[in-house]
Structure formats: structure tokens, C-alpha cells
Image (cartoon, rainbow, N blue to C red):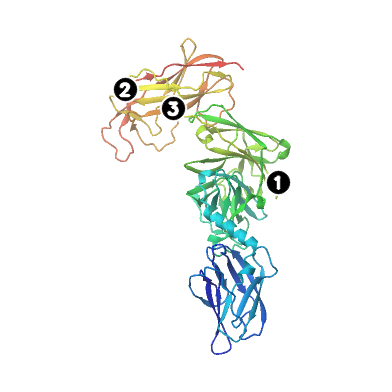
């Protein structure tokens, strides 16, 4: 039976052979500088009734810090709740029984499993007063540790916006899987990371129930009083780093598969870390355990992290929020992680913004290939999740082994939140993966700063077109921003669930002859709702890209509206022809939306915008 007394005094009931039991009283100092707790396990059994002098051994099972001194004994007893003494108790008179506790051998700190000597001197006077010999227990190193704890408690909790986060992961140690979250204080003041990370796993778009074990021992036994365990918090000075490992068994029964996990942590404000791996199936066969926060330098990560070996660039160099960008990533030292042709490396982005959690997600590369499942976890996943999961057992190989470069398309809105690019080299069986990381910051401009080039309004509507530059090389993409507005139309105008119809694009040659008209090709994967009324006074826009001749392979993220014939001068015009929203003869109350799209209300055009395509 464990008895926890949050005050400085405990009375122990000692079974005795005579009628009245001997009672021992223990009191201890609870000063601001001396806050220590012991979990003591009595090894020698019951105390003798009247020993002349005898030594017994007590083992410290765990040691941790508390706001007040707490003593937990594995014996029956009762707690007396009394305000603790302001100073260390005086040495008791010789006529009273004394039990003094000293570390043996003397150590710099109290560690789990440390033995202590307990000396019992039992003269005639009982009940006996028992005290902790604070001069022996509170060693200089322990006082230093207490000072550090006090400093941590005085420091504020970290603002998640001032914490730079990255991820590594590995199927290590053997039979287990580990995700490591790496934190760096990028602020100007010291702050505390404190509290557990709640893990919420998902599979096939649905949440899962997975047991958690915070501050666990190796046998998944939770520690007592975790709020004050060292791993429950860590103090980070500006620029310092910490790591949090989440680990589970990947073999055994029963097991579950997971596609992603969301770690939720409450610091200064709640925050989350979303982890979505690529080609790394998560096979969870136990509770998810963590030993808490640790300093990054204290032990290696699950996955070697190497900074400075990755170069990242983006095109175009000037980019607006509606546009698409191409990331180019290359290894600065190919020999560092050159892989066999059988391996597949992966590319990841780490994204974070003021109103979004930190997200670790795979980045599909241009020219990726498909391969049969190539790791033991993938093969097992194909077998256990069945044909509905991957009927052809094919996996995406983003970066074939031996390659030192990769390109990927990303939206400018996402690019603005990218804080890191990670290249995960493909490890061999039982090998530790290598993560090459590059910290990034990309400037993305507001589209509203571009000139909309509104044309003449007609019947209360207007159209515009923006472009950020005039000259392009053959092979470059031409980013276009098409604008439209119902300023004050005399009739209700119709739009679909996806804001269709959007403007068409008219391409003219240098003499303003129409070369071709690229129609609105909006593909709406909605619910079949609508039509709806186009609101008045609301400016709307969309982004498209016009390919010049011999453009690189198109990405499905881009909306290409056709090719320009070749080098030369062109004029581009946005043309908008909205439809009238006609009422239904009999309203359909089961449908979201009202009426139906009728005739063309009017056609408006933007001002012509000149571009020039030059030969390479």
C-alpha cells in the first residue's frame, strides 16, 4: 500500500509484539530551495520493537521533483496534514529514537535504484521522532537541479508560433516504430515545453482508438505523479532544441494499421503536429509510449538529421498567392546518401502558419514512378488490408535510388507556409534512415497588389486580367489572374456551386487579330447544388496558366489553358458572359439552390494585356 503525504509529516504504524504499537514520526524541511520527493520501498520488513542498534537498507525506487516534499512509503500508515516547517528541523535529543537517512555511497544526485543507509537508534523513550538528515540528502548537485527546476517554473510556456518543428521516423529499434518530433526555440526568450502530446491516429479517413502511455518505463508502466517528472517539461533557451519520441511495438497481437497521426499539445495555447508519412506504413501493436521531452544533444534521434546538404530553389522567383510554383531540390553532396537503384527516397514539406498546425506531408515529385511494394511493412500491409487498399500492390516512388535532384509543384499559398524541406533517404533493412533538411522561407505576394486592368463595364458587370510581368522565354509558363464582378446588374445572375461560369481567355496576335479563344474549362466536383445568385459588389478571381511552346511536363495541380504558337507578341483578354438566373415554374424544395440558368445577360471584356515570348 502506498501512502502519499503532500505535507512534511507522516506517522508510521509499526506492528509490534506487545500490546501498544510503537509509532514513529517523520518530519522534513519544505523550504523553497529543497523540494524533493522519494518513493521508498522498505526492504528489511518491520522495524524491531526495541533494538539496541540495527541497520536496514531502503532503496530509492524513483526520484522526482515536487513543489513540496513528498514521502511515499510502501508500508501501512497514516498521514498527518500539518503545515511544513519553515526551516530544517533541529537534531533531536539523544533520549528520542532517531532514524537518519544518508546516501550510500554519497552521490551527486538521487537516481532510481540508489541505496540509502537507515540507522535506527532506539533508546527507552517512545514514541520515537524520525527526521531526514537534510545535510546529507540535499547535495550541491541536487540544489543546482532544484535551481534549474525553479528557473523552468518561472519561465513562461512556449508560444507554438515561436517553436520551429521538424520530424524524423524509423522502424527502429527492431520490432518497434518511432516518430521523433524535434523542437527549436526560435524566439528571443527562454520558455517551457510542458505536458504530454496526445496522439490521434487515423486510417482510411477515420479516427482510431490507440492507448497512450506518457512518461512510461520500458515495460509500459506509467510513472507516478507525472506532472512533476523531469520528462514532463523542458526549458529551452533561445536557439536550443528538444526532442519528443513517440514509440510503439510493430509486432505482436492485436495490431492496427494507420495512415496518419495528429499530435495535440497544450503549451501557451493548444497546437497540433500532423504527421503523414509516405511509403512508411504505421503498424501499431501496443500502446503509444513516450519518455517525455529530452535535450536534443543528450541522445541520438530516430533517423540521422543532416543540415546543410540540401539546396532548395523555387521558380518563378516572384510569385503571387493564387499561382503555382516549382520547387527544385538537389543534394549538395551526392556521396553522403547515394542509394542503390532499388531504393526510393521521399520528399516532404514541413508547413506552419499562425492559424494552422505544423504539418509534415509528402510532396509528390514530377516524373515519379510506380513500383511494387518494396519494404517488409508495405508487403505486410498489402496482405492484411486486402485488395480494397491497393489492388495492384503498387507504391509511388518519388525519387529513384541514385538520383540527386527532384522537382515538385506546390501552390503558392502552401509555399508561403513551408518552413522546412526534408529528403528522406531510403534505408536498407535494419538501417537507420538519413534525413537531409533545409530550413526555408519563401515570400509570396498578394494578388490584390496587381493591376486588374478592368475593361469598360456593361449593364453593371465588368471583367479584368492581371499578369505580373510582360516577357517570357519559350518553355516558361504564363501565370494569369482573371477577374470578374457583378457591380450592380439589373437582373439576378446565376453561378454554379464552383462559381462557374468563369471568364474565357482570348489570345490575340500583335495586330489584335484573334488567334484562339480558350473557353472556361472549370471542372466542378461538387454536390450538384445550385444555381445560386452572384452577389453584387463582390470581386472574384481565378488563376490559370498558359503554356508556351515546349513547356515541361504539366502537373495535375496546374490549370493549363493551351499553348501559345511560339515566340512573338501577344495580347490577352479576359471575356466574361454570365447567365441570367431564371425562376422555376415550380420550386424544388429538395434542391439546394433556386431557379435555373437562362440566357446570357451580357458580355464584358478586360483591357488587352501585352506579353512577349522570346526564344531561348
Marks 2, 1: nearer the viewer: 2
Q: Is residue 166 left or right of residue 490?
A: right
Is there any visible trace of residue 253 in the rendered image? no
Q: Residues within 10 Å of mark 1 (few under 14, many from 20)?
A: few
Q: Which residue is mark 2?
A: 460
Gap in angstroms between the C-alphas marked 1 and 3: 50 Å
Q: Which label's residue is closer to the chain start, 2 or 1? A: 1
Q: How far, Cα to Cα, is label 2 from label 3?
A: 22 Å
Question: Looking at the image, which residue is at 53% across and 46% down?
Answer: 274
The residue lying at 28 percent from left, 32 percent from top is 584
Q: Residue furthest left?
A: 585
Residue 517 in the image: state x and y as whole percent.
45, 19
The relative height of residue 154 versus residue 398 in the rendered view (above or below) is below
Residue under circle 1? 428
Report, in whole angstroms, how far the alpha carbon at label 2 lies from the one at label 1: 66 Å
- Is the C terminus in the top left, top right, bottom left or bottom right quadrant? top right
Q: Dot 3 surroundings within 10 Å: few (below 14), some, or many (20 or more)?
A: few
For residue 77, above or below residue 513: below
Q: Earlier in the sequence, mark 2 or mark 3?
A: 3
Amino acid at each position: 500500500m502506498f501512502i502519499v503525504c503532500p505535507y512534511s509529516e507522516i506517522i508510521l504504524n509499526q506492528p509490534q509484539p506487545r500490546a501498544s504499537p510503537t509509532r514513529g514520526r517523520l518530519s522534513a524541511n519544505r523550504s523553497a530551495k529543497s523540494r524533493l520527493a522519494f518513493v521508498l520501498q522498505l526492504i528489511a520488513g518491520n522495524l524491531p520493537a526495541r533494538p539496541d542498534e540495527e541497520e536496514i537498507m531502503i532503496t530509492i525506487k524513483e526520484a522526482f521533483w515536487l513543489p513540496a516534499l513528498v514521502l511515499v512509503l510502501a508500508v501501512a500508515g497514516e498521514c498527518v496534514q500539518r503545515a511544513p516547517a519553515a526551516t530544517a528541523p533541529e537534531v533531536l535529543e539523544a533520549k528520542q529514537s532517531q532514524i537518519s537517512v544518508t546516501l550510500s555511497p554519497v552521490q551527486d544526485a538521487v537516481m532510481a535504484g540508489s541505496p540509502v543507509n537507515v540507522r535506527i537508534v532506539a533508546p527507552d523513550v517512545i514514541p520515537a521522532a524520525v527526521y531526514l538528515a537534510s545535510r546529507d540528502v540535499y547535495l550541491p548537485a541536487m540544489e543546482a537541479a532544484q535551481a534549474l527546476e525553479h528557473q523552468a517554473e518561472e519561465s513562461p510556456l512556449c508560444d507554438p508560433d515561436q517553436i520551429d518543428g521538424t520530424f524524423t521516423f524509423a522502424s527502429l529499434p527492431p520490432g518497434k516504430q518511432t516518430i521523433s518530433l524535434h523542437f527549436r526555440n526560435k524566439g528571443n526568450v527562454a520558455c517551457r515545453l510542458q505536458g504530454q502530446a496526445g496522439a490521434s491516429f487515423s486510417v482510411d479517413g477515420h479516427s482510431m482508438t490507440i492507448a497512450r502511455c506518457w512518461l512510461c518505463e520500458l515495460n509500459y508502466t506509467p510513472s507516478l505523479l507525472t506532472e512533476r517528472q523531469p520528462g514532463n517539461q523542458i526549458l529551452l533557451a533561445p536557439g536550443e532544441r528538444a526532442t519528443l519520441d513517440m514509440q510503439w511495438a510493430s509486432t505482436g497481437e492485436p495490431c492496427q494499421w494507420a495512415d496518419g497521426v495528429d499530435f495535440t499539445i497544450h503549451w501557451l495555447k493548444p497546437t497540433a503536429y500532423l504527421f503523414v508519412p509516405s511509403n512508411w506504413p504505421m503498424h501499431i501493436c501496443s500502446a503509444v509510449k513516450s519518455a517525455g521531452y529530452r535535450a536534443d544533444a543528450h541522445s541520438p534521434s530516430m533517423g540521422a538529421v543532416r543540415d546543410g546538404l540540401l539546396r532548395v530553389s523555387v521558380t518563378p522567383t516572384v510569385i503571387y498567392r493564387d499561382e503555382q510554383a516549382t520547387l527544385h531540390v538537389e543534394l549538395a553532396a551526392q556521396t553522403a546518401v547515394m542509394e542503390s537503384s532499388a531504393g526510393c527516397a521521399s520528399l516532404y514539406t514541413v508547413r506552419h502558419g499562425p492559424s494552422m498546425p505544423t504539418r509534415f506531408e509528402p510532396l509528390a515529385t514530377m516524373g515519379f514512378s510506380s513500383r511494387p511494394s518494396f519494404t517488409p511493412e508495405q508487403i505486410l500491409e498489402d496482405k492484411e488490408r486486402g485488395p480494397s487498399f491497393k489492388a495492384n500492390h503498387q507504391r509511388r516512388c518519388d525519387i529513384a535510388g541514385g538520383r540527386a535532384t527532384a522537382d515538385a509543384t506546390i501552390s503558392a499559398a502552401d509555399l508561403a507556409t513551408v518552413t522546412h524541406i526534408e529528403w528522406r533517404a531510403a534505408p536498407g533493412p535494419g538501417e537507420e534512415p538519413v534525413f537531409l533538411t533545409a530550413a526555408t522561407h519563401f515570400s509570396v505576394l498578394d494578388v490584390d497588389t496587381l493591376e486588374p486592368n478592368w475593361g469598360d463595364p456593361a449593364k453593371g458587370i465588368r471583367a479584368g486580367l492581371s499578369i505580373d510581368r510582360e516577357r517570357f522565354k519559350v518553355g516558361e509558363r504564363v501565370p494569369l489572374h482573371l477577374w470578374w464582378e457583378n457591380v450592380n446588374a439589373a437582373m439576378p445572375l446565376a453561378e454554379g456551386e464552383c462559381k462557374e461560369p468563369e471568364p474565357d481567355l482570348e489570345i490575340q496576335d500583335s495586330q489584335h487579330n484573334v488567334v484562339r479563344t480558350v473557353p472556361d474549362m472549370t471542372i466542378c466536383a461538387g454536390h450538384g447544388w445550385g444555381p445560386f445568385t452572384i452577389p453584387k459588389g463582390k470581386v472574384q478571381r481565378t488563376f490559370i496558366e498558359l503554356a508556351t511552346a515546349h513547356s515541361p511536363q504539366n502537373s495535375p495541380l496546374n490549370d493549363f489553358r493551351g499553348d501559345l504558337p511560339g515566340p512573338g507578341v501577344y495580347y490577352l483578354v479576359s471575356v466574361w458572359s454570365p447567365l441570367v438566373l431564371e425562376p422555376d415554374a415550380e420550386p424544388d424544395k429538395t434542391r439546394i439552390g433556386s431557379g435555373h440558368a437562362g440566357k446570357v445577360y451580357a458580355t464584358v471584356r478586360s483591357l488587352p494585356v501585352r506579353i512577349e515570348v522570346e526564344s531561348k
